[in-house]
Image (tube, helix red, strand yellow):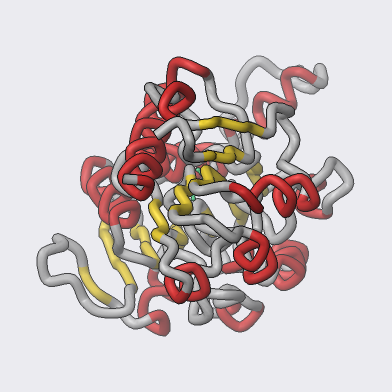
Amino acid sequence: MVSQRVVATFHLPREWLGALPDLADFVEWGSGEPAPRDWLLKEVGEADGLLCTVTDRVDEEILRAARRLRVISTYSVGYDHIDVGAARARGIRVGYTPDVLTDATADLAFALMLAVSRRVVEGDRLIRSGGWRIPWSATFMLGSEVHGRTIGIIGMGRIGRAIARRAAGFDMKILYNSRTPKPDVAAEYAPLDALLPRSDFVVLAVDLNPSTYHMVDYGFLRRMKRSAYLVNVSRGKVIVERDLIRALEEGIIAGAALDVFEDEPIGADHPLARMNNVVLTPHIGSATVETRRRMAEVAVENLLRGLR
Ligand code: DGY
């Protein structure tokens, strides 16, 4: 297989790559920054396999440049950054890494729910800035509870189901919305009009596609409870961010906890970063050592199968 060329747009620890670097002529973009477009356009020209990730836009232009490409393996569960239709039309196989990151992402959804409603990050910031002066007060830093409340999960795929399992452990009432009702899920299916006004936490676990792009706009947020929190572990472009900022400024919802953003990365000057009732994490849903290693195994296996 050594005559086959594999291009990786990012660095993975050598021991996570298994036999790949020995089996193929392996080229990787080694810096921590996303691979530049020009580099990818050039390198993909002679590649048989492409190992890419969410920061690479694999579109018509890249595919046109990729004269020999037979397989694209993305190191992610989401594949909205790949023009899958155009790849298929050229007979290029596309692999992704579902299942292995489900639990890590659901864990993060819960971490975000707890952090925003129990003001965990705000409390940490208060102490570090020297602002904790009174040892204890009956009305100091009151948040709202998670256990026993109602969660509205939007998207009942693998990650939505894993969030529902955790919510059951917190004795939550579980509502969900998805394209079709899932009779095997122990939760109540609700149309958005019914889910939004009843949920204390609205958690987004959808994939990004034309029907979910910008689904959370001002009208959506206005249908939520004023005391509710919005949590997003899916894709940033599911939310119209300026509408969310407006809703938070106007007190239309109580807060938000977000792992993903419309344009990543965001900086300290972003309006969301100035809000106390917002918890932000830098797209780390799957970022555990165990999960990222398993993702590597799946991505390498997908790539090798495609080459074979
Ligand atoms: C994914 O897998 O799609 C995440 O967003 C990155 O791990």
Q: Is residue 94 visible?
A: yes
- Residue closer to the observer: 193 or 88: 88
The residue drawn where x is 21% and y is 70% is 188
Q: Quadrant of residue 70?
A: bottom left
* Residue 46 percent location from the top left of the image: 61, 48
Image location (x, y in percent) of residue 45 = 65, 53
Q: Position of residue 260 (x, y in %)?
A: 61, 51
Residue in front for this viewpoint, 11 or 40: 40
Instruction: Please provide percent x and percent y for residue 7.
Output: 58, 40
Q: Nearer the viewer, residue 169 or 34?
A: 34
For residue 244, what is the image quadrant?
Answer: bottom right
Q: Is residue 258 visible?
A: no
Instruction: Say whether residue 143 is left or right of residue 244.
Output: left
Query: Hey, which quadrant is residue 199 in on the image?
Result: bottom left
Q: Residue at x 44, y 22 (%)?
A: 22
- For the C terminus, which image quadrant? top left
Looking at the image, which residue sits at the far right?
269
**Is 88 above or below relative to 306?**
below
Q: Residue furthest front?
A: 3
Is 182 left, or right, of 109 in this rendering? left
Query: Who's the residue at 28% across and 48% down the image?
Result: 162
Quarter containing the N terminus:
top left
Seen from the viewer's position, the closer of residues 126 and 20 is: 20
Tell me the residue at 39%/67% (across/down). 154
